[in-house]
Amino acid sequence: MKKIYIALTCMSILGGTTACSDFLEENPKSEISSSQYFTQPDHARAAVNKLYRSGVPQFYDADAYAGSKMMYGGYMSGFFDNEKKAQEEMVRYCQSLSYTSQNLSGPIEKLWDDCYVGISNANTAIKYIPTTPGLEEAERESLMGQAKLFRAMNYFHLVKFFGDVPLILEPYESLEDMFVSRTASKEVYAQIIQDLQDASAVLNDAAYTQNGFRVTKWVAETMLADVYLTLSGYPIQENHYADAAKAARNVINSHRHAMIENQDTEANSAYNQIRTLDDSNEYIFSREYDANISGNNPQPGFSFPLGAEGWGIFQYSILLRTYTPTKELYNIYDPENDLRVQEKQYFHTSYTYIKDGKEITQTFDASPYVWYNEEALLSTGKNGKDLPIYRYPEILLIAAEAIAESEGVTSEAIGYLADVRARAYTKMDRATIVASLAGLSKEDFIHEVWTERLREFIFENKIWSDIQRTRQYPQTSEANRGKVTYRNVIGATNPWGATFEEKHLLWPISHNEIQRNPALEQNPGYDR
């Protein structure tokens, strides 16, 4: 498996490494100018390589106690807990919906800054790659496509996090025009779409895992489908469901990606293969890790409850459930039919080991099994498992929802949802699942798609984006596990007793950013 790693020594000259203007993390100063740097093909390649390790891809890197930036949305939803939240104010403020522009100024500022670092790096690459000497035209186009895709990725997350944001398409190379005002979200989305379309036109027609783990045409099309689906929902509600369906069909009909099949319903289930494999074509795009370079990534330690380090068998010194569903979210699964909720699939509740010649079994509340890495936990103390960002089931579910919205509940839409559900409902044949979906109204069918997204991607940081775009909040009960209903998120109460207001659907812009850039207006409902 080929991994992408970046030599950062030369790349320190590119914008975004050291802040001159803190509010955007753009860097007009450098040891040598960018135009002096892009003088040979390796410079252009290094500039693009850096994009895989800056901005949004870094949001998947986790802290042992606080988790990753991508987990913030789960905490905001109220459906995830952290056993160390007493010391993690981000988690407490999110669960209580008491975050402001000041009490979480640092973490919120970091989201903003890191995205603009990624954008700055992409802008520099996009400006100078066309004039870099020595590149073959095909490689030049590919590098440009990769840079545009990552610029789009960073803007997509920014606009979901904050709404209107400054749209900057050139690298900062002077002190002029440093204070940029916010651009309307629709205009930002238009640029995101253009960048992704440009990327799709030139990137390789291949599966990501068969393309040296570099982004491909089908990563761009998957992102386009996601962007169109999001744009169709709140807050913009500009109907692009047909466009989302078209992009999703492009990926499906390419036959470059497919779902992993169950070999059995235990250790070789599809879900355990997802847990252990990096090179399956189910992965459309992932965050890469290498145990020898990335070091001690903490995700395996999230698989066990606080105090498990005292069992004396693990190479990790910190183990705790940093990111674990509340019982309200755990209840989305049908305990009889859904393989994903069975022991040692997505979750586990016990662990057996041998110590001092004795077999010991520890039991605990349901904990994530998706990050369990036996070699890292018991032997090396190093985790090299990649984290999925887009998997093929997501394209099937985007297609199902977008087709239902634009064409109705067709057999095609039903089939895509049934494909994802049938893999989990191993006691039920696919025809039975299709029949159960065929009689649903459009609204009920779409709710089933949302529910399947919750179940399939519970640990993949999708829940908050879905709540934002649908403005619907899932509700479950212990008495009827597997049954999910939806209500308007505005006025809904989360499991911690806090009530959502409209302002909570966007982060405030941090107090620090507002103070540094007088051109920025605060999001409604938050103090400057």
Image (cartoon, rainbow, N blue to C red):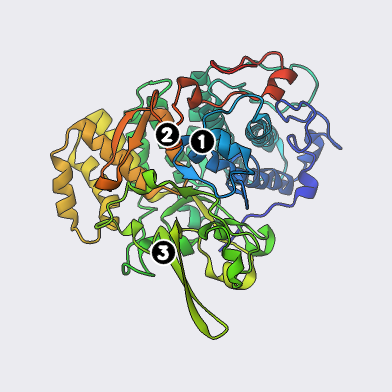
Rendering coords of residue 418 (x, y %): 24, 49
Outermost residue toward the bottom? 357
- Foreground disc of the pair 1, 3: 1
Q: In the image, what residue type sits under mark 2?
A: Asn
Residue labelled with disc 2: 494
Q: Marks 1 and 2, Cα distance to the nearest angstrom? A: 8 Å
Tell me, for residue 66, which label it has, or none: none
Q: Secondary structure at mark 1?
A: helix
220 displayed left or right of 473: right
139 displayed left or right of 15: left
**Crowd rating for badge 1 (residues with CA inside 10 Å; few <14, some 14–19, many 20+):** many
Of residues 452 and 229, the one nearer the viewer is: 452
| Vertical relation: 148 (above or below) 43 | above
Q: Secondary structure at mark 2?
A: loop
Rendering coords of residue 62 (x, y %): 61, 49
478 displayed left or right of 146: left
Identify the mark nearer the N-term, 3 or 2.
3
The part of the image, by quadrant, that contains residue 244 is top left
Q: Quadrant of the C terminus?
A: top right
Q: Marks 1 and 3, Cα distance to the nearest angstrom? A: 30 Å
Identify the mark nearer the N-term, 1 or 3.
1
Q: In the image, what residue type sits under mark 3?
A: Asn
Q: Are marks 1 and 2 in contact (CB under 8 Å)?
A: yes
Q: In the image, what residue type sits under mark 1?
A: Gln
Of residues 376 and 5, the one nearer the viewer is: 376
Of residues 138 and 269, the one nearer the viewer is: 269
Rendering coords of residue 304 (x, y %): 52, 60
Residue 92 visible from this viewpoint = yes
Residue labelled with disc 1: 95
Q: Are marks 1 and 3 in contact (CB under 8 Å)?
A: no
